[in-house]
Image: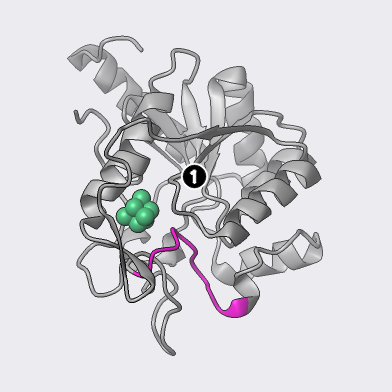
Amino acid sequence: MEPVTQINVSALHEQANELNRELAAMDADGRLRKVYELFGEGLIATTSFGRDAALLLHHLKRLHIPIRVFFMDTGFHFPETLAYRDTLRKEFDLRLHTVSSDNTERRKYAVTENGELRITDTDACCGINKVEVQRRFLALPDVKAFITGLRRDQSSTRKDTPFATVQRGRIKIMPFADWPQEDVDLYLRLWETPEHPLAAQGYPSIGCSPVTCTRKPLPGEDARSGRWAGEAKTECGLHLDTEFGP
Ligand code: SF4
């Protein structure tokens, strides 16, 4: 990765702002075609194989955009998520890169209490198992831009999600930023994509399996309220604005 200087930081932000304006006038198909045309093999996709993962992955398959797909295996995923990963990899013929932490402290914060797996410091655990891992693959010299499935209606903290921004020195693309959940559900139903096994069990947002990290929302709560429930934490850090952080 090139050293980040003030000049190329400004140029990158300018490029992202211009792209954001351009993508805003397109639909999701147009956005994906445009960024593939711009970045080619330098474009990657990221996914956690959560409830709506098939939205992005099916688009890539349907539009013949055969880019690399990065998945962070935290070591704490539900077995159903790993099974879903394998199903979608086969179904969509994904060029999947499963990446995980080699930090010796990656399980340091995991404890079992009353038969339940809990994380004692979720910020530190996400830092090691997600943020550090993301930083490593985004720093690969052949990665120029990355796509995520982030959407504005997922939570109040995501309501201003743009179509393009800068994170960690790379252009970050969110082609579905303006899709409401109903449109996502309709798309997945129309194309009959495989469903995450936990979706039918009432999980609208599926993260890691410890009880501190994912539980079913109570009636009337928003879809992400079951993530780190009871903590102030609402994001794992992957989508926070830390583009040039340590
Ligand atoms: S979501 Fe939970 S288990 Fe997964 S990395 Fe973060 S703290 Fe660790």
Tell me the quadrant of ligand 1: bottom left
Is 224 located above or below residue 150 in the figure? below
Taking the spot 26% from the left edge, 10% from the top edge, the residue there is 3
Taking the spot 49% from the left edge, 55% from the top edge, the residue there is 77
Where residue 9 sits, quadrant-wise, is: top left
Q: For the stretch drawn in magenta, what is the main secondary structure?
A: loop
Q: Magenta stretch?
A: 201-211
Q: Amino acid at mark 1?
A: Met
Pointer 1 residue: 174
**Disc 1 secondary structure class:** loop
Determine whether, in the image, residue 30 is placed left or right of residue 100: right
The percent position of residue 157, horizontal first and vertical second, equals: 30, 61
Taking the spot 44% from the left edge, 90% from the top edge, the residue there is 219
Taking the spot 58% from the left edge, 52% from the top edge, the residue there is 49
The percent position of residue 147, horizontal first and vertical second, equals: 52, 38
Q: Is residue 50 magenta?
A: no
- Residue farthest to the bottom? 219
Where residue 216 sits, quadrant-wise, is: bottom left
State whether residue 28 appears in this view: yes
Determine whether, in the image, residue 80 is placed left or right of residue 89: left
Is 230 located above or below residue 119 in the figure? below
Where residue 122 sits, quadrant-wise, is: bottom left
**Residue 6 or residue 232, whichever sits in front:** 232
Determine whether, in the image, residue 225 is placed left or right of residue 204: left
Q: Is residue 202 magenta?
A: yes
**Residue 74 or residue 182, whichever sits in front:** 74
The percent position of residue 230, horizontal first and vertical second, equals: 24, 75
State whether residue 166 appears in this view: no
